[in-house]
Image: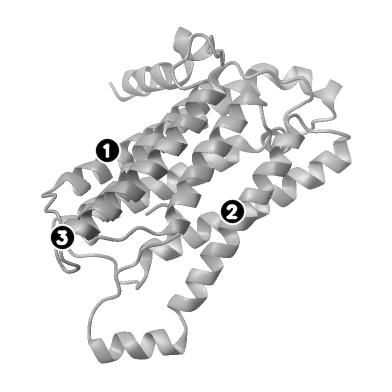
Amino acid sequence: MSTALINSFTYYLSEHPYIVGFRWSHNQLWGSTWSFLFTSIFLYIAVSASLHILLSAVLRRNRSVPLGYIPEIHSLIMSILSATIFAGILLSAAAEIRDTRWFWRRSKTATPLQWLLCFPLGTRPSGRVFFWSYAFYLTRFVHMLRTIFAVLHRRRLAVSQLFCNSVMAFTSFLWLEFSQSYQILAILSTTLVYSVVYGYRFWTGFGLPGSAFPSFVVNCQLVLVGCNLVSHAGVLTMHLIKGGCNGIGAWGLNSILNGAILLLFLNFYVRMHSPMRRRIDSVNGTETKINTVVGR
């Protein structure tokens, strides 16, 4: 019974004909055009800012819009989606390594890690891993709802939050459009962390006991930022050694945007752990409400 279940699980996540035959296409896939990308990002920023301005004009500062358990349900959905994408792209990457390893010699690729970091030149956005990359891209728009919840419930709108969520949607689009190297490791690390973080938010949102470690969410996101930094260094190294990785131009733009996110996060992290901040929190006797620049 367990073997049949595993085989079924593997089939629907990596061997289904639609997944195997997936192809990134501007004409056949929802949200696959540049116009959709920029329009959706513009609407996300405009709606969030307009809602914040409207509530500031209508409600008093200490008032908020009750949302019930909507944020917790959203967290549960995002946790499940992230875990599914993590399992799907992990199995799909293993299947692609199994099926295409014979071809690697032509591209100076010797190990699976080298392939994960550096796609051979000429790689097209089709097949298993790009199906899950497309699924990850779509979840970026579901993730944006977190900003709306923050504006309605906590009456907060951080420019850094708008920037980071917009960048995540933009870079996810670049991964598909230019068959960019490194995306598999980025999706694996991001979905793994998000499944844990959103699961934790769902758990604590219903008043259940949280982690014994302070700043659990922020520390998880710090690990994610560190993994992305190491992966970017690996891509650059492989590009210089192999004489080229696919989508390196898009990777360069991706690196610049991720660098900006890294600076924002480090600035937030340093301020949060500064002695003055600790002293203020101790005097107030309240738990600091964390609104990180990576994903909330």
Q: Is residue 67 left or right of residue 136?
A: left
Mark 1 — residue?
77
Looking at the image, is mark 3 or mark 2 nearer the viewer? 3
The label shown at residue 227 is 2
Q: Can you say which quadrant of the picture contains the C terminus?
A: bottom left
Label 3 element class: loop
State which tag comes first along the sequence, 1 or 3: 3
Label 2 element class: helix
Q: Residue at x 46, y 46 (%)?
A: 165
Q: Can you say which quadrant of the picture contains the N terminus?
A: top left
State which tag comes first along the sequence, 3 or 2: 3
- Of the residues shown, which amino acid type is indicated by label 3? Leu
Task: Measuring from the top left, give residue 125's x and y in whole percent.
Answer: 62, 19
Q: Residue at x 23, y 80 (%)?
A: 286
Looking at the image, is mark 1 or mark 2 nearer the viewer? 1
Front-most of 82 and 43? Answer: 43
The label shown at residue 290 is none
Mark 3 — residue?
59
